């Protein structure tokens, strides 16, 4: 059995009173100070969930959102400070919030994690079971209720796009059909539909915007644009691209978890922050995949190799052009992700996470750090990466996906906008303060 090991931060900041001015619409009360160890109950189970949920790719976000919504609802059944997402189990108010949070997470993870992880999850819950606190009953009820909202992974016919100019088609090396097609039609958690924030179409192939996007990624996203050796030290842009080359949402999720501990948020505030962030990011993934399937736009590797056939005199084709992601600096088999280009998944996640943090804390300026989530074989010279603003990290993702040769700038910018709009909608529609 694979052992689940937690890597939780123990930095401490002085507790500061802070007003949360939320887009000049409302001001929330300050969080009550509690010892960080209590908040760690929520972050501990978030870490366990992140390590044991094994649904591939962004589908894992659907399960993580379910876990965090259950934890939030379990705590709010006792506290009654914020609206629940879905579950309203009965509680007297005297139950242990920690026991309720742990039981809610355990109940959902019992379904969304593999059998090999169950013993480790039982061990993490054992201290609460031994206490036999009535909060366990509240947590189990919240978990059971959220499991009725589980989003399954349906089996759908393979989607391979088209072969005309501008149309996505399977890309080297594997030439695989589109992955995670089901996300485009999955029921969102808070949005009204997957297409609610669908952006306008990508730039027409004959447009000046397309010419600029094309030539930018052709120039800086090729293998030849970076050092041929994956080692340190390295150019700043190359190191940044390598850092953001994998699945990015685990790094964002850990950052949210660490910030909650560093800012010494209460147990309820920690649960709400993680629930808002994961619900928004799950819905951002659904919205982005709706855009990908709807527009079926080709990737740079296809566009540049077919550049002489796109009808734009300013885009010179190169049949041998290869994106940086396919270099030997990455794990064997790394390639352009197997799904359409517009819009970017990584930037949708970045927009959702960063905007949730901005709204929650009422500011963009808050120092924090991000840790790598790419394979150990990839040389990362700066880890963790330090930021002064949430938007600084999100801006890096835009640049990195171009430097990797897998996205045009417009797709990155539009995806970040999708994530931002989803996060704002989620923040003002779900888990709102209870008016007294």
Image (cartoon, rainbow, N blue to C red):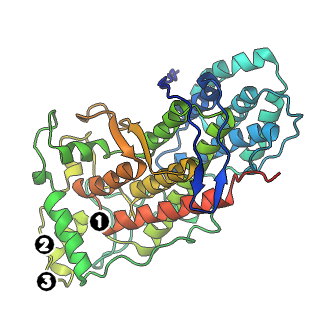
Say which residue appears at 35% left-offset and 62% top-offset. Answer: 412
In three-dimensional space, the C-alpha distance between marks 1 and 2, rounded to whole angstroms, equals 18 Å
Q: Position of residue 421 (x, y in %)?
A: 52, 64
Which type of secondary structure does the marked residue at label 1 adopt?
A: helix
95 above or below 430? above
Whichever of callouts 1 and 2 sits on the residue coming sooner in the sequence is 2
In three-dimensional space, the C-alpha distance between marks 1 and 3, rounded to whole angstroms, equals 20 Å
Depth check, front residue: 187 or 132: 132
Q: Which mark is residue 317?
A: 2
Q: Left or right? Give the position of 67 relative to 293.
A: right
158 above or below 234? below
Q: Within 10 angstroms of label 3, few (less than 14), some, or many (20 or more) residues?
A: few
Q: Is residue 194 visible?
A: yes
Where residue 116 sits, quadrant-wise, is top right
Say which residue appears at 48% left-offset and 65% top-offset. Answer: 418
Residue labelled with disc 1: 409
Q: Which mark is residue 336?
A: none
Residue labelled with disc 3: 313
Q: Left or right? Give the position of 65 relative to 412.
A: right
Q: Position of residue 19 (x, y in %)?
A: 59, 47
Question: Contact, CB < 8 Å: mark 2 with mark 3?
Answer: no
Question: Contact, CB < 8 Å: mark 1 with mark 2?
Answer: no
Whichever of callouts 1 and 3 sits on the residue coming sooner in the sequence is 3
1 vs 3, front mark: 1
Say which residue appears at 35% left-offset and 66% top-offset. Answer: 411
Which type of secondary structure does the marked residue at label 3 adopt?
A: loop
Which type of secondary structure does the marked residue at label 2 adopt?
A: loop
2 vs 3, front mark: 3
């Amino acid at each position: 059995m694979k052992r689940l090991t937690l890597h939780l931060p123990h930095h401490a900041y002085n507790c500061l009173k802070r007003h949360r001015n939320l887009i000049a619409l409302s001001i929330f009360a300050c969080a009550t100070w509690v010892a960080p160890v209590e908040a760690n109950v929520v972050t501990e189970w978030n870490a366990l969930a992140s390590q044991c949920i094994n649904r591939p790719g962004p589908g894992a976000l659907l399960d993580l959102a379910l876990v965090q919504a259950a934890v939030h609802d379990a705590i709010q059944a006792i506290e009654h400070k914020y609206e629940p997402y879905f579950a309203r189990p009965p509680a007297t108010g005297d139950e242990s919030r920690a026991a309720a949070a742990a039981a809610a997470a355990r109940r959902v993870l019992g379904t969304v994690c593999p059998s090999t992880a169950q013993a480790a999850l039982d061990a993490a819950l054992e201290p609460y079971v031994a206490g036999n606190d009535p909060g366990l009953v509240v947590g189990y009820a919240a978990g059971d209720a959220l499991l009725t909202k589980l989003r399954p992974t349906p089996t759908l016919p393979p989607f391979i796009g088209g072969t005309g100019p501008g149309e996505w088609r399977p890309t080297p090396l594997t030439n695989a059909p589109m992955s995670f097609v089901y996300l485009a039609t999955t029921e969102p958690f808070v949005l009204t539909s997957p297409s609610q924030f669908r952006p306008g179409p990508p730039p027409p192939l004959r447009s000046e915007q397309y010419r600029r996007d094309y030539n930018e990624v052709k120039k800086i996203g090729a293998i030849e644009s970076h050092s041929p050796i994956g080692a340190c030290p390295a150019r700043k842009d190359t190191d940044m691209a390598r850092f953001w080359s994998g699945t990015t949402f685990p790094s964002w999720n850990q950052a949210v978890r660490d910030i909650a501990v560093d800012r010494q948020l209460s147990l309820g505030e920690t649960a709400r922050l993680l629930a808002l962030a994961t619900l928004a990011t799950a819905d951002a993934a659904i919205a982005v995949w709706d855009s990908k399937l709807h527009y079926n736009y080709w990737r740079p590797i296809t566009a540049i190799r077919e550049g002489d056939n796109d009808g734009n005199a300013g885009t010179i084709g190169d049949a041998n052009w290869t994106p940086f992601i396919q270099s030997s600096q990455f794990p064997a088999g790394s390639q352009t992700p197997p799904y359409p280009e517009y819009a970017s998944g990584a930037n949708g996640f970045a927009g959702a996470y960063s905007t949730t943090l901005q709204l929650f804390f009422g500011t963009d300026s808050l120092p924090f750090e991000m840790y790598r989530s790419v394979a150990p074989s990839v040389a990362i010279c700066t880890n963790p990466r330090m930021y002064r603003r949430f938007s600084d990290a999100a801006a890096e993702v835009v640049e990195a996906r171009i430097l990797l040769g897998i996205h045009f700038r417009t797709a990155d910018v539009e995806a970040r906008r999708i994530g931002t709009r989803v996060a704002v909608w989620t923040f003002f529609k779900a888990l709102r303060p209870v008016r007294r």
